[in-house]
Amino acid sequence: MIDRRPAVIAQCHNVGDVVAAVRFAREHGLLVAVRGGGHSVAGLSMCDGGIVIDLSPMRGIDVDYTRRVARAEPGVLWGELDRAAQYFGLAASGGVVSHTGIAGLTVGGGFGWLARKYGLACDNLVSAEVVTAAGEVVTASAEANSELFWGLRGGGGNFGIVTSFEYRLHPVGPLVVAGSLYWTLEQASDVYRFYRQWTPRLSDDLSTGIGFWRTPNEHFVPQELRGVPMLSVVAVHVGPSIDEGERLVNELRAAVPPAFDDVRTIPYVAVNHMLDVPHGVRSYWKTVHVDTLSGELLGTLLELFKRAPSPDSQLYIEHALGAVARVADDAMAFSHRDAPYRIIVDALWNEARDDAENIAWAHEAGAALQPFATGTSYLNYVADTSEADVRRGYTEEKYRRLLALKSEYDPGNLFSLNLNIKPTSPNPREASQ
């Protein structure tokens, strides 16, 4: 959906290249887009007439087994970091799709299959090497440039370009219980009622989501169920006991026997491929947080799903909390940790001629969900970049603090193609130069 033509693309191979690109952009007054994994649904990885600082060649990963940390460059994708860490039986808390870039996901929060047990990607960030808007290289951690470190963890790409991420790793796998269970739409209300009673008492070892989409048109799905609209629950158990994972999933199976069951023991490196969407699919998202899974919400979701103009579109509810909610709210910029459920409206289609009706459906769905919403959102799932949409991602107090940080580190808003926090006052040091 994004067809933008930059004046130049700087393909960076090291931090020196990034510094040169930033200084060149400042010298020539160029609009700057920063590309990590290129996974931005809003198209923020590309620009018209400016410079794209392309980090995709920076793919280095170094795992320190004794310290249980990994250093990864900003062009790395989650599937690549999974493979590198799993060689040592370890994993970084990341996302749910293998071809998501680590960079954008981490600075925006980073919710994924390990979040309920080990926290968000940003919760597990130990340090970051950052190229600032001034073209300087600094380290941000709890000990060095701590306010910048606070802002990087949830504040997005507003404050600089991270050229190295150091993550805390955790023992996971190599085998886990994971997969999807499917029910007919006639069974949806029974499954949904059980799911809302089941999730609050689940172990942090089990992460789940529930949603409406069509079954894959693949050989492992029974012929009569391929491409059929159904309700699905995705489950990933990362605890030390495979038997315990099976026991927990069996509670769901026993409550409402599924029409198709694809939960099994698989390698952890396969988990973040389960929900992969092929490149080239047109996409538009809306997202809200909700506190409860009411019957009225189910009815609204079901009606919206039936009206989706594309058979590929999805409505999905992520269950959060766990370790995410146990981090102190003021520890970092990321906000709204107490939201138990997150709904993602994921409009997916293939042809440009269908853009208007699919985007309109996503907007309709977003509006229809507002009566159930808390008024907050998770910015990594936001396709709109208005100030109002950005502000919903933070508490008022944190937004004010982020404004001050932006004004210090990027007073000229060089890094504007992001979920932007516009600076309100110049950096005193820069103003005096």
Image: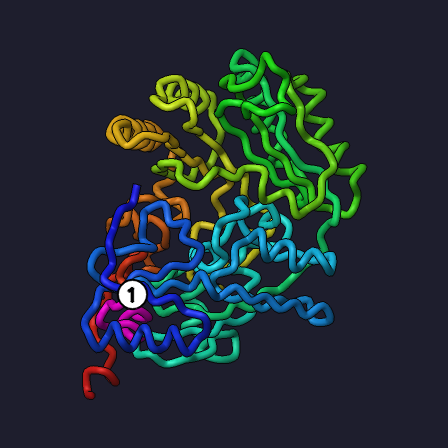
Left or right relative to 345: residue 203: right
Q: Could you say which is closer to the camera, residue 116 or residue 413?
A: 413
Left or right relative to 223: residue 213: left
Helix, strand or loop at label 1? It is loop
Q: Tell me if residue 414 is in the magenta stretch.
A: yes
Q: Where is residue 232 shown, x and y percent of the image?
A: 56, 25
Name the residue rendered at 55%, 53% in the picture.
Answer: 78
| Residue 121 in view | yes
Name the residue rendered at 38%, 63% in the picture.
Answer: 54
Name the residue rendered at 62%, 40% in the picture.
Answer: 207
* Quarter of the rendering containing residue 410: bottom left
Q: Where is residue 68 shown, x and y percent of the image?
A: 68, 67
Indicate how the structure is coloured in the image. Answer: rainbow
Identify the image quadrant of the C terminus. Answer: bottom left
**From what the image shows, is residue 45 above or below residue 302?**
below
Q: Residue furthest bottom?
A: 433
Q: Where is residue 65 shown, x and y percent of the image?
A: 72, 68
Q: For mark 1, does the 10 Å Cα neighbourhood hold few (<14), some (14 to 19), or many (20 or more) residues?
A: many
Q: Where is residue 140 shown, x and y percent of the image?
A: 47, 75
Left or right relative to 264: residue 343: left
Name the residue rendered at 38%, 39% in the picture.
Answer: 287
**From what the image shows, is residue 130 above or below residue 392?**
below
**From what the image shows, is residue 208 above or below residue 218?**
below
What residue sits right under mark 1 in the picture?
415
Identify the image quadrant of the N terminus. Answer: top left
| Residue 371 in view | no
Q: Please, what is the three-letter code of the amino acid marked with disc 1? A: Phe
* Quarter of the rendering containing residue 22: bottom left
Q: Tell me if residue 108 is in the magenta stretch.
A: no
Magenta region: which residues? 402-415
* Quarter of the rendering containing residue 175: top right
